[in-house]
Image: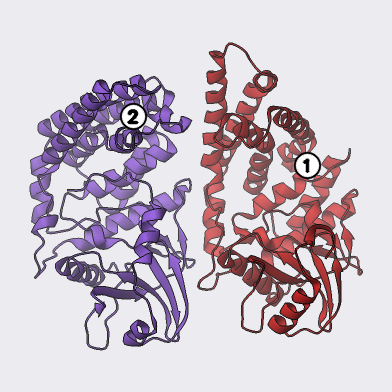
Amino acid sequence: MPGSFTRIKRHEIMELVESEYGFKIINMHEGDKGILIYTDCGIKMLKKAKRDEAKIQFAAYAYEYLIDRGFTNVSKINKTLSGSYTINYNNSRYVIQDYARGKIMEIKTPEAAAQAAHALALLHKAAEGFVPPKGSHARVDWGKWMDKFKANSINIRKYSKTLQDKKELSRFDRIYLKHAEDYYEKMFNAYLIMRNFGYLEKVQQSMKQNQLIHSEYRRHSLMLDDKGEVFVTNLENCAYDIREADIATLLESFTGRNKAELAIAALKAYSAVIKLDRRSIKVIQAFLLQPKRFYKVIERYYGRKKNFTEAELVYKLERAIKKEIRKAPVLEVLEDYRTL
Amino acid sequence: MNFEIFIEEDRQKERELLASYDLDVEFFSKLGLKIKQIVPERNCYRVESDKGFYCLKKMDLSYDDIYVMQEMTMHLKGNGFANTFEIMHQENDEILVPYRGSQYYLSKWMDGRDGDYLNLLDIKTSIEALARFHQASVGFESKYNTGHRRLFGRWKESFLQRLNEIEAAKIQIASEETKSDNAPIIAQYLENCRQNAKHAIQLLEKCSYEKLNARDESQKGFIHHDYGFHNILHTFDNEIYVGGLESYAFDVKVHDLAHFIFRLMRRRGWDIESALDMIGYYNEVSRLEKEDYQVLAAYFAFPHDCKQLYRQHYIEGKEVEDLEELDKINVESEYYQTKRNFIHEFEKFSRLL
C-alpha cells in the first residue's frame, strides 16, 4: 500500500481479512484514518489498534451495547469468525470498523450545537447501565477529578516556588510566572466548585447507573451523515465517568465568536433529554474552569516527562494560554445559569 | 512481622512468578477444565474455561497458611462478610492441586475495577468494608498452627529492628568514600527517620498499646495485613471484594486502618482532615476508642516509608534521580514539612480525646 501503510501488502491483507471475517473484498484503498475496504457486507475501515485486546474488547462491547439500546449512529468494531475483535498482522494488532460516509460536523450555528448536544444526551441515555463483559478492561474515571484539580493547583504553586531560587529564568519560566497565580486560582476554584456543588453526589449517581461516557465528545468526533444526522466516532476512549465531563468537552470545542450562543443552545438541547440541574451546571463549569491545557504543558516542562524541546514547549504554552482565554464566554454562560 | 509495606508493585517479580507456573494440557485436564484462554493478570492467571472464569494461583505459602486462609474465608462468610475470594474445592474435596512438585489452587474470577486513591467514594467504601471485615473476623479459631502470624504486642520489637536498620544505613552512607550529589540530603533524611522512629517508640511506650492488644486479642479476630487498593476489587454492581488474604495476621485492628491511611496519605498528601474523615468512615461501622487513636499516632509517627526511599541509594547504589522521590526525602521540602505537621497534629488530636 502507498502512503503511511507502506508495510502492508495488499494481497496479504485481502487474504487475512477474507479468511478472518468471512467478507468478500471487492476493492480497497488508503483513507485518512485507515484502509478503506469495500466488501460484500458494506464499506469497512481497517485501523491499527493502539490498545491491548482487553481495552479494545471494552470499547467493542460498548459500541454493541449502544446499538442494542437504540443509539445506532456509531460504527461498531467487527468481530472475526472466531469471536475476536482484533487481527494480527506484522506483529501489530488491527481492528475493522464499519465505515460511515459523511463530513466532519461544523458547529457554527446554535442549531448545530443543539443537534450535537441532543445526540450526546441520547448517547448518554443509551450508555446507562453498561456492565463490561468478563475479560475486558474498563477505563474508569469516576471520582478522580476533584482531588486531581486540588493536586494540580498545589503543583502550580510548587513550580512557582522552585523558580524563586532560579538565577536565570528561561523564556518558558517567564511566561509561566506571568500567568501562574491566575491559573492557580482557576485550578483551585475548580476544585472548590466541585467540592461545594456535589461532584461526589454526581459520581455516586453515575456509579449506581454504571454511566459510560464518550470522553472525547468534541467537534472532531462528530460527523454529519448523508441523512443529516449526527454520527459519533472515536468511541474507543469511552470510560466510566459523569456525563458532565462530556458536556464540558463539547462546550470547550466550540469555536468562533458566538460561543456563548452555541453553549446556551447546547445546554438547552441536552436538558430537554436529560435534565441538567444547578449542580450539573456547576460541575461543568469546574471542568471548563480548570486550565487543563496550560497544566499539561507546564507539567511536561517541570514534571517528569520532558519529551519536547524548549522551543516546542514555549509554543505549546503560548497556544494553551490563548485557548484558555477563549473559554471565557462559555464560562460566563455557565456562571449565569438562571438565564437559560 | 512485616512492616515493609511500601514497596511498589514489582512487575518483574510478577512476571518471574508467572513464568514459574508449569501449565500444560495435562495439568488442566487434571483440573477438569477445557481451556479457552489463559491470560496473565498481576500475580495469577485468568483462566477462561468451559465451566467459566477462574483465577489460577500457584501456592507460595505453607500448607497450614493456605488452609488457615480458607478457614478465614469461611469464617468471614459465616459472619456475614461473603465478599472474599473463596478457594474452589476439587472433586476430591481438596483445595490444592499438586502438579510437578508445586501446588496450585483456583478461585472464582471476579471482574471489576481497582479502587482509585483520588476517588473519595472508593476510599469510603474500602474503609467501611475493612471495618466490616474486622467485625466478621471476631471469634476465629483455627485447627492449624498460626503462631508465626501472631503480632500482638510485637510492634515495639519491630520498630526497634527497623531503627537498627536505619542506623546501619546512616553509618554506611557516612563511611562512603565517594559521595553522591544527594548524599547530604539522604544523610539528613536518615537522621530524621532515626529521630522519628525513636519518637514513635516513645509514643508506643507511653500509650495504652498493651491494653489495646489485650482487648483485640480477647476478641479473637484477625487482620488482613496488606489492605490496599491492589487487594480491593469494585465490581460493576457496586459490590466490593477483598482479596490478598495470604498476608493475614493476628494483631490489633488499627494496624490495617493505619496501613491503609498511611499509604493513601503518601499519595494524596498528608492532610489531617482527610485522615480524620477516613477514620470517621471506620467509626461509622465499628467504633474506635482512645487507645486506638494513640496507637494510630505511634504508627503514623514511625517512618515506614524510609527504607523504600533510601533503598535506591543504600541497597542498589543508585543516584536518586526522580525529583519527586527526592522531594520526599528532602527534609526542607514542602512534602516533608506537611508530613511532619500531620504527625504532630494527629498526636495532639489523640492526646485530646
Above or below, A122 relative to A64: above
Say which mark, if any, is on residue A161: none
Provide the chain ID for the residue under circle 1: A
Q: Of circles 1 and 2, which is in front?
A: 2
Instruction: Please tell me which residue lies in front, B277 or B320.
Output: B320
- Residue name at image x 8 percent, y 43 percent: B211
Left or right of residue B76: residue A244: right
The chain displayed red equals A
Instruction: Tell me which corner region of the image, top left, top right, bottom left or bottom right, holds residue B91.
Output: bottom left
- In this rendering, does residue A276 appear at all? yes
Element marked by disc 2? helix
Q: Quadrant of the C terminus of chain B?
A: top left
In this rendering, position of residue B261 left or right of residue A40 = left
In-front residue for pair B163/B16: B16
> Does the CB distance between marks 1 and 2 fall below 8 Å?
no
Considering every residue shown, the one lying at the far front of the view is B177
Q: Is residue B5 left or right of residue A124?
A: left
Kindly identify which residue carries mark 1: A339
Chain B representation colour: purple
Q: Nearer the viewer, residue B101 or A98?
A: B101
